[in-house]
Image (cartoon, rainbow, N blue to C red):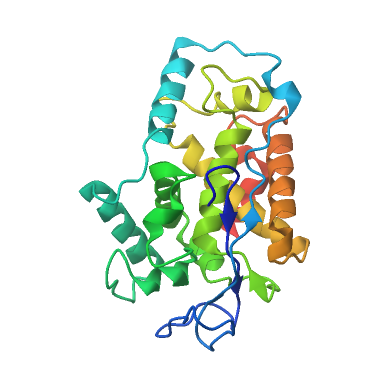
Amino acid sequence: MDDREGSFVAVRRISQGLERGSVYNSSSAEGVPGSAAWLGRGLSCVCAQRRDSDTNSTFDLTPAQEECLQSLQNRIDVAYDSTIPLHQEALRDLWKLAFPEEELHGLISEQWKEMGWQGKDPSTDFRGGGFISLENLLYFARNFQKSFQDLLRKQVGDRSVWEYPFAVAGINLTFMLIQMLDLEAVKPRTAVGATFLKFLSAENVSAFDLLYCIAFKLMDQQWLSMRASYMEFNTVMKSTRRQLERELMLEDIMHLEDLPSYALLSQ
């Protein structure tokens, strides 16, 4: 992911799901049966867009909302650090949840490409999303295992020949949500950001993680309905953001579980 806008590589779906035991040789441009073939870098992410109207006003917060927002911002500020044991263990946990049947050979390994990382060292992909993007993936894997596996292994729907890479797409989604909700501002400057804070409370500290899971499933649904391939990823992200914004602003939404797209997590 690029520091300015973000970029990722696309993965060619050779067969339904992910096959074990074969590793793509980056010296070849051809797909190898049972492996993931990677296209080149250069697809920019639209996540960092900000409309001019976004900064025209601010919304006041209650003391409780300020505390919850500060706590979330503290999470956002944590960069992934491959030298920190806690971060290393979190990455190992992600592998175990993704591929419980396969032993990981190391934190730097060609195996990581099977999950949709750009190279053999996932830490290089965390620049745009930070440690919270890894926490988001872990939350998804632990709380919605079926949906996580379906997206990871591309098991649902009529898939494109060139698919989005699961892990890097996940980092793009974390970054998109941070921008959409204006979470790096002292006070939210958008109605969507202010509305999200009503879901974030001491009793629901995982609201951002849950919204991430909803967003991931919604993005995949948009991908399938648009019959998208890697060149349409930015268009899919724009569509996903617009749909999330619309759903968050619905009048009868009292909990994130009331969002229409939440139902996708049970499919």
Q: Position of residue 13 (x, y in %)?
A: 60, 77
What residue is drawn where x is 35% and y is 45%? 80
Q: Is residue 161 above or below residue 123?
A: below
What residue is drawn where x is 36% and y is 59%? 94
Q: Is residue 69 above or below residue 97?
A: above
**Position of residue 126 in the picture relative to residue 173 (left or right):** left
What residue is drawn where x is 55% and y is 23%? 198
**Along the line of sight, the residue nearer the viewer: 34 or 205:** 34
Q: Is residue 78 above or below residue 36?
A: above
Q: Residue furthest bottom?
A: 33
What residue is drawn where x is 51% and y is 17%? 186
Q: Residue furthest left?
A: 85
**Position of residue 92 in the picture relative to residue 118 (left or right):** left
**Along the line of sight, the residue nearer the viewer: 27 or 213:** 27
Q: Position of residue 141 (x, y in %)?
A: 43, 57
Instruction: Name the quadrant of the C terminus.
Output: bottom right
Q: Residue furthest front?
A: 27
**Along the line of sight, the residue nearer the viewer: 195 or 47:** 47
Task: State whether residue 30 appears in this view.
Answer: yes
Q: Residue furthest right?
A: 226
Q: Position of residue 97 (x, y in %)?
A: 37, 63
